[in-house]
Amino acid sequence: MRLILILRNVFRHKLRTLLTVVGLTVAVLAFGLLSTVVEAWYAGAEGASSARLVVRNSISLVFPLPLTYRQKIRQIDGVRAISTANWFGGIYKEPKNFFPQFAVDAASYLDLYPEYVLSEAERKAFLLDRKGAVVGSKLAATYGFRIGDTVTLKGTIFPGQWEFVIRGIYSGRDAKTDVSQMLFHWDYLNETLKARSPRRANTVGVYVVEVSDPARVAEISRAIDAEFRNSYAETLTETEKAFQLGFVSMTEAIVVAIRLVSYLVIFIILAVMANTMAMTVRERTAEYATLKALGFGPAFIMGLIYGEALAIAALGGALGIALTFPLAERFASAMGSLFPVFVVSAQTLWLQAACALAVGLVSALFPARSAARVRIVEGLRSVA
Amino acid sequence: MSAPAASPVVPPAGPLVALRDIVKTYRRGQQVVPVLSGISFDIAAGEFLALMGPSGSGKSTLLNLIAGIDRPDSGRLVVAGEDVGRLGEAELADWRARHIGFIFQFYNLMPVLSALENVELPLLLKDMGRRERRERAELALSMVGLADRMTHAPSELSGGQQQRVAIARALITDPTLIVADEPTGDLDRESADDVLRLMQRLNDEIGKTIVMVTHDSRAAGHAHAIMHLEKGVLSGREELRG
Ligand SMILES: Nc1ncnc2c1ncn2[C@@H]1O[C@H](COP(=O)(O)OP(=O)(O)O)[C@@H](O)[C@H]1O
Ligand SMILES: [Mg+2]
């Protein structure tokens, strides 16, 4: 009976309830999408290993490091393995088709990144082909790359047309793995550079270092940087995670703004719904006074109002959460490979549910209190 | 402050309701408006009493005090042996649920509940199973002649029918006392007569004690006695039938 009262009250003003539910759905949906965008920004860093260090030129990422550093770094205590990567920055057909490409020391690089899962045959084929490349599964899906395809990139940092043959498609070990990259041979880049612009040859963008003990990363980083102090290319060594976050932090302000907006949206719908509930409760003052006269206590009356607000919040929240998945999917495909990882996380779902719950509870707070406090005689007077 | 509770319990043979020196004032800004100035009277069990008086004379205020939905500034109100003034807010609510049946001028039914559900509503406060609640509500609705209107919403009923639903709701808990504030005030003559005859039957056949506020002397004619209230003072009691 209590439930009947609550549910029938919910649908008493159908249009009002519908508008409130739609508002909540949109708010929860927007919140979910924005949270997912924020998480996607950080996803690269989340997938990063804290046992890997990135060594770069201390002046700026755009300045390379000498090839000779490789041996020196390799000899530092605590360094287990080393590889290299150069940011290529090529354009595939049109500038809007952005995806990361790295010229890497292939064999050692793949060893350093076990999360890039590649079949033994594909790995072998890649290593044997000087012009070979491997692409992540998401990238392959986005542009329809298949093994054996020839892909031509227009260089921006390294001018000219560059041809590659897809020799493998790697998948991610888990959802956090970046499967939107393209890796090819540093040798291919370097030999072409030797012919076209010899001054730029024999350099490395960054060294990637695996340490034997993750607990010692700070100490090893300092040791590496100390090794090259006062040399003509000083280094800055940080964990891969810190490196990625540094990348992300360029857009930190945007991320903060997005977060803020996502909570603002929830706050606005809270204000709207609180107003709706207050209006609803005011209209029913005589009913609450009647219930009190009949002997129902404040708890019963507050229960009716909380129940009604929570039912509306649950409806809007559930719809919003349910719609987040298809929307995120469409958003991700529209964004192409801009976000390497774009997954609606469990945390986002919980936050959405918590927001809907909070909106329900908070919007009922004051109306429920004032309804429970209605003085019977005055409440009854408000009839007709 | 009166003497410390000389006789807290009214003997069973005494009146059902006893009012002593009831005073009630309202404050309107600076101004203090006296509404009831020292009312004392008794209501015997089984009585059907009409309370008459001009508009603004304090009839509703007095009825609200008797029903325990308002409190006097001073004076004592004893109903069925209980000193109502001593009850706290929650106790008073329980007390109303047990002892008072309400009939309002505008019926005050829950618009989202059917006739049957409205009648059943007060039983939620009793320790009673669903089936029993339903059966009792059906019985009460048949008693007021609305067995064929159980699933109707209040908005689908005439004023007279709504008031009969309200009477069934007032009856269902078998209260000690039924209070009715202008129960026919919003009804046409025919429906009003129906409602009054029904109230009279409740009094005659099942012995319900009823206090009814009205300014309609035709309505008051159905009662045993009429109390006249004028400017917050009782001006007399008129017996109509033994
Ligand atoms: N809440 C209130 N605040 C101020 N004055 C009130 C209030 N309730 C009733 N009154 C005043 O008390 C007097 C008696 O009211 P009421 O008992 O409703 O009269 P009746 O029912 O006899 O018409 C009226 O003058 C009314 O204006
Ligand atoms: Mg009145």
Image (cartoon, coloured by chain):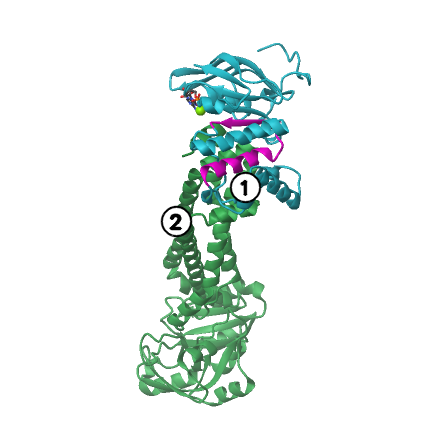
Q: Residue at x 42, y 63 (%)?
A: A37
Snapshot quadrant of residue A38: bottom left
Same chain for marks 1 and 2? no
Q: Is residue A29 visible?
A: yes
* Nearer to me, A85 or A172: A172
The 10 Å Cα crowd at callout 2, few under 14, some 14 to 19, many 20 or more, is some
Q: Secondary structure at mark 2?
A: helix
Comparing marks 1 and 2, which lies closer to the viewer? 1
User: Which residue is depicted at the point 31% across and 76% down?
Assistant: A95
Q: Kindly give the residue lying farthest to the top in the view shown.
A: B3
Q: Amino acid at mark 2?
A: Ile
**Within the displayed image, which quadrant is ligand 1 positioned in?**
top left
Query: Which residue sits furthest right?
Result: B12
The amino acid type of the residue labelled 1 equals Leu
Label 1 crowd (10 A; few <14 / some 14-19 / many >=20): many
Q: Which residues are magenta?
A: B158-182
Query: Which chain: green?
Result: A
